[in-house]
């Protein structure tokens, strides 16, 4: 078995070996990774210690975003990228990460237009019979509605902290020309009055008000993208969308630009707590390297537009918007169920949208599964018959051959040979057999420990060193022994 560090993922499928991680004892002893039936190659991790401090610090500073590959029996059995590193140096923790919350080099801000066309603070008065609102010095005629539904509404902040609002009708004169506006509870102006708080019943004193254009109130706008092209060239495009409530363009743009400045490059951050003991110096160093499968890069970009199509077509189209993962008709099973990729009012991350599409199943209610393996997305129906069998703590395929731990992928039905099956109930009732379970995740830890995570249950340990004589080694396989 081997664990290899290859060039950065932005290098087009580079094959050159940067470092043999298996030659580092601490990495070889701590390597573990998880593959999921929803996501494929998911996460992995190893530690580096026992090397010179300069070597470990160089690894931390240099290899974020580089590709990691596990090889066994002359095949690649897992791959991903260096996603997050935590360096513990003399009692202090330092982190570098590609997580989008802490690193994004393409930023947009979406904000709700609150539709405000005017805001005033002046000599304000509630008037009753008929119910009206006055602002000496204001000309309300520009916002009046004389026929059809109201175009504007008025929202008043009161001294006791309450709010009164209503739809605006015709303007009139109280002190100055058109300084008074008729107010109604409904947009068609059939019922005079206020919504929320009735100033005719409460001792409200108006402090300020806003005039809002109903058609544009709450409409979502965006600032357009701001980008750091140098960072994108070094690490790939990592998008991030800020979602704001009522805001103006200038404020949304300023927040967008501040995000790009702060998070546009995966800088080193000090995290956690620091323990200081007077008179005792810390001289320890350890590096924890966390890897992510290429499925993680599907959460780096967004789908911006909605579309209705078949599930399989939407999965292919959404996947191919990404920078590092592809999908085709050969890898995405047919599923003609008509559905919508809904990206309004907010765009959706590609990975979230794909999972939503997978969760829909098909028109017959059959469940599906998906995963990214070697930068390719695969989508298929979940199996209906067992393909692996557990007997006396050993795992076998349908042909009775003992399973090689590194080769096993999740998303299969497991049948336990020694399961304690209860008698069938009377009356011919149909029950689900308790000797079959769906395997959602597979966790492999070097040298050959395997854990299967079953649907809705805790993980079970199998193939822990394949129990004595059943242990697989690459040397035995290469020698033709089974």
Image (cartoon, helix red, strand yellow):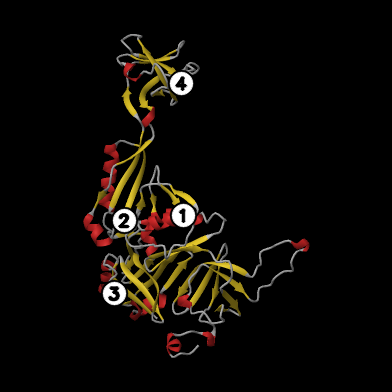
In 3D space, how far apart are the residues under numbered discs 3 and 1 (Cα atoms)? 34 Å
Q: Residues within 10 Å of mark 2 (few under 14, many from 20)?
A: many
Residue 15 seen in render? yes
Residue 24 falls in image quadrant = bottom left
From the viewer's perspective, tell me whether residue 315 is left or right of residue 457: left
> Looking at the image, do the residues carrying marks 3 and 1 touch, with CB atoms under 8 Å apart?
no
Residue 238, numbered circle: 2
At horizontal 50% and vertical 69% (from top left) the residue drawn is 410
* Closer to the camera in the image, 195 or 88: 195
In 3D space, how far apart are the residues under numbered discs 2 and 4 (Cα atoms)? 47 Å
Q: Earlier in the sequence, mark 2 or mark 3?
A: 3
Q: Earlier in the sequence, mark 3 or mark 4?
A: 3
* Closer to the camera in the image, 18 or 382: 382
Disc 4: which residue = 188
Residue 40 falls in image quadrant = bottom left
Q: Secondary structure at mark 2?
A: loop
* Tag nearer the camera, 4 or 1: 1
* Tag nearer the camera, 2 or 3: 3
Indicate the position of residue 86 as horizontal and vertical percent values: 34, 65
Residue 333, numbered circle: none
At horizontal 41% and vertical 62% (from top left) the residue drawn is 329
Q: Name the image quarter holding the N terminus.
A: bottom left
Q: Earlier in the sequence, mark 2 or mark 4?
A: 4
Q: Earlier in the sequence, mark 3 or mark 1?
A: 3
Q: Earlier in the sequence, mark 2 or mark 1?
A: 2
Rendered position, 466 above or below 323: below
Q: Secondary structure at mark 3?
A: loop
At horizontal 34% and vertical 20% (from top left) the residue drawn is 143
């Amino acid at each position: 078995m081997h664990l290899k560090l290859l060039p950065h993922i932005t290098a087009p499928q580079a094959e050159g070996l940067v470092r043999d991680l298996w030659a580092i004892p601490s990495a070889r002893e701590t390597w573990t990774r998880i593959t999921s039936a929803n996501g494929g190659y998911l996460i992995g991790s190893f530690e580096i210690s026992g090397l010179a401090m300069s070597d470990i610090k160089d690894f931390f500073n240099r290899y974020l975003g580089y590709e990691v590959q596990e090889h066994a029996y002359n095949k690649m059995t897992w791959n991903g990228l260096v996603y997050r590193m935590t360096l513990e140096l003399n009692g202090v923790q330092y982190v570098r990460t590609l997580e989008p919350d802490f690193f994004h080099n393409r930023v947009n801000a979406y904000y709700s237009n609150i539709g405000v066309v005017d805001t005033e603070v002046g000599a304000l008065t509630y008037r009753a019979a008929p119910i009206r609102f006055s602002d000496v010095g204001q000309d309300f005629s520009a916002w009046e509605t004389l026929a059809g539904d109201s175009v504007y509404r008025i929202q008043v902040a009161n001294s006791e902290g309450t709010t009164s609002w209503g739809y605006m009708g015709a303007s009139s004169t109280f002190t100055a020309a058109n300084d008074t506006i008729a107010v109604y509870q409904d947009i068609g102006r059939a019922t005079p009055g206020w919504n929320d708080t009735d100033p005719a019943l409460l001792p409200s004193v108006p402090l300020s008000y806003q005039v809002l254009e109903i058609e544009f109130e709450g409409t979502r706008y965006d600032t357009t993208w701001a980008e750091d092209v140098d960072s994108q060239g070094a690490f790939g495009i990592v998008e991030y969308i800020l979602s704001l409530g009522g805001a103006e363009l200038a404020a949304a743009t300023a927040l967008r630009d501040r995000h790009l400045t702060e998070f546009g490059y995966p800088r080193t951050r000090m995290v956690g707590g620091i323990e200081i003991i007077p008179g005792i110096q810390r001289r320890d160093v350890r590096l924890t390297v966390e890897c992510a499968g290429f499925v993680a890069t599907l959460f780096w970009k967004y789908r911006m537009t909605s579309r209705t199509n078949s599930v399989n077509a939407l999965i292919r189209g959404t996947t191919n918007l990404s920078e590092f993962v592809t999908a085709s008709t050969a890898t995405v099973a047919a599923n003609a169920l008509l559905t919508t990729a809904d990206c309004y009012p907010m765009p959706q991350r590609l990975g979230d949208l794909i999972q939503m599409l997978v969760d829909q199943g098909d028109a017959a209610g059959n469940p599906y599964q998906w995963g990214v393996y070697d930068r390719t997305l695969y989508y298929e129906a979940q199996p209906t018959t067992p393909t692996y069998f557990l007997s006396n703590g050993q795992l076998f395929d349908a042909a009775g051959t003992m399973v090689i731990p590194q080769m096993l992928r999740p998303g299969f039905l497991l049948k336990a040979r020694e399961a304690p099956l209860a008698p069938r109930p009377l009356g011919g009732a149909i029950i689900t057999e308790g000797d079959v379970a769906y395997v959602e995740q597979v966790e492999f830890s070097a040298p050959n420990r395997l854990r299967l995570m079953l649907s809705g249950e805790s993980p079970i340990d199998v193939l822990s060193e394949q129990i004595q004589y059943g242990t697989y080694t690459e040397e035995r396989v290469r020698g033709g022994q089974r």
